[in-house]
Amino acid sequence: MSESAADATTTPGSPVPDTDPAYREAVVDLLGAIAYGEISAFERLAEDAKLAPTIADKLDLATMASGEIAKVHPLHERIRAFGRDPFEAMAPFREPIEEFHGHTAPSDWYEGLVKAYVGDGLANDFYREIAAYLDPDTRDLVISAMEEGYHAEFVVDRVRAGIAEDPRLGGRLALWGRRLMGEALTQAQRVAADRDALSALLAGGVDRPGLDLAALGRMFTRLTERHTVRMGELGLDP
Amino acid sequence: MSESAADATTTPGSPVPDTDPAYREAVVDLLGAIAYGEISAFERLAEDAKLAPTIADKLDLATMASGEIAKVHPLHERIRAFGRDPFEAMAPFREPIEEFHGHTAPSDWYEGLVKAYVGDGLANDFYREIAAYLDPDTRDLVISAMEEGYHAEFVVDRVRAGIAEDPRLGGRLALWGRRLMGEALTQAQRVAADRDALSALLAGGVDRPGLDLAALGRMFTRLTERHTVRMGELGLDP
């Protein structure tokens, strides 16, 4: 167990803050959503790895998939520190996350790459925004779960090379990126409607500052701006 | 780069021994076979994870799968230290390993668990036997790639619980374990026939002791004995 917040990223079991039950419920929701998202991302990336044109590509995607699983265990440990069962905490997010994946099944290798890049990036940006409203130990853990590593570069290289070889691919993938954004928003709205504690986290509490509608609007603007940047990095019109 | 053999497990790029080309070829073959085996095991475990009855089981199998991928990168680095391309080094083993998996596709969750346990164990025992004939740096690397972690226990628990619930399962899985052993031997013989340098490694060289036929027989006996022990651990007749 950690005695300070400084090493929280390596000690997810460090003491939890003694705050209102609503906050704790929201944090457990958030950690459950991220953890299930990682497990689900593993499954999808492992599935997409089958489409890889070379063994080297397959290994890169498998390495990305493995990276997702490595993040699950500390999230689960933190949920346990909050006195909850991680599998129960993940349960409410299974349906919206699986539905997102069901509606965005890549039809080829490139769609899988763009989804990994854009989808992961969007989820990471959103969790980083939310992290600002968390206690320091949980915040450090959430942020450490978002580190991307070298794989982003691999995706950018492959997608750009694919478009250079067949320029029509760029148009198709640009549409695909927009669809991913739309589906992500649909499921996010659904979660916000279903999970009161999680939504309330953003609105603040007695002892915590929250977001008013204008701030929520600015957060949304930042998320779409970063999505646009990512599409540009891949060589795609946003 | 390492300057001593002591920390070889963390520095797979440490200097390679200045021995005969046949030895180097054999080591590159061996590392290539193990590395491709890990990638292939990742794919199969990720596929089997879909059959998991609970999210907890799915996560355990996904964690096993991720563990395989973590082992690939140091093996590749060691192949590069021997001056060879890891993807070329893996290529000759793709067909026999895929054929093994093609002939042993699990038809349910339990067959997948037994395959992960028995197949991994058998491969690990074989590589540990071969490790005795390697230079110290490569030997340490091969042995560190064989560490099993906590997952063995998880498989034993699940399979024993399954048999307790439905005793007929034990008979079916015992047959399955025998089939896995038979298929593994078939593919191993094929590799031995195709890869002269690798077979010659076991037979020794000018400056290296090898195995005579009697010693090879004893090695085979040890492998089957350990297979029998593993089957027993799972509660299965060997």
Image (tube, coloured by chain):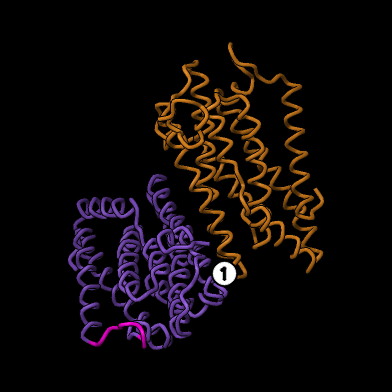
Chain colours: A purple, B orange
Q: Nearer the viewer, residue B58 or A25?
A: A25
> Residue B211, located in which quarter of the rendered image?
top right
Q: Position of residue A123 (x, y in %)?
A: 34, 69
The stretch of residues the image draws in magenta is: A205-213
- Left of A154 or right of it: where is B223? right
Q: Position of residue A119 (x, y in %)?
A: 33, 67
Q: Nearer the viewer, residue A130 or A58?
A: A130
> Residue A125, located in which quarter of the rendered image?
bottom left
- Relative to residue B150, is residue B55 depicted above or below? below
Which residue in the protein does label 1 denote?
B55
If the image is split into quadrants, where does the N terminus of chain B sit? top left
Q: Nearer the viewer, residue B201 or A166?
A: B201
Q: Secondary structure at mark 1?
A: helix
Magenta segment, prevailing SS (helix, strand or loop): loop
Seen at 45% across and 84% down, the residue is A20
Q: Tell me how many marks there are.
A: 1
Whether A53 is among the magenta residues is no
Q: Residues within 10 Å of mark 1 (few under 14, many from 20)?
A: some
- Relative to residue B142, is residue A57 depicted above or below? below
Q: Position of residue B209 (x, y in %)?
A: 64, 16
Q: Chain of mark 1?
A: B
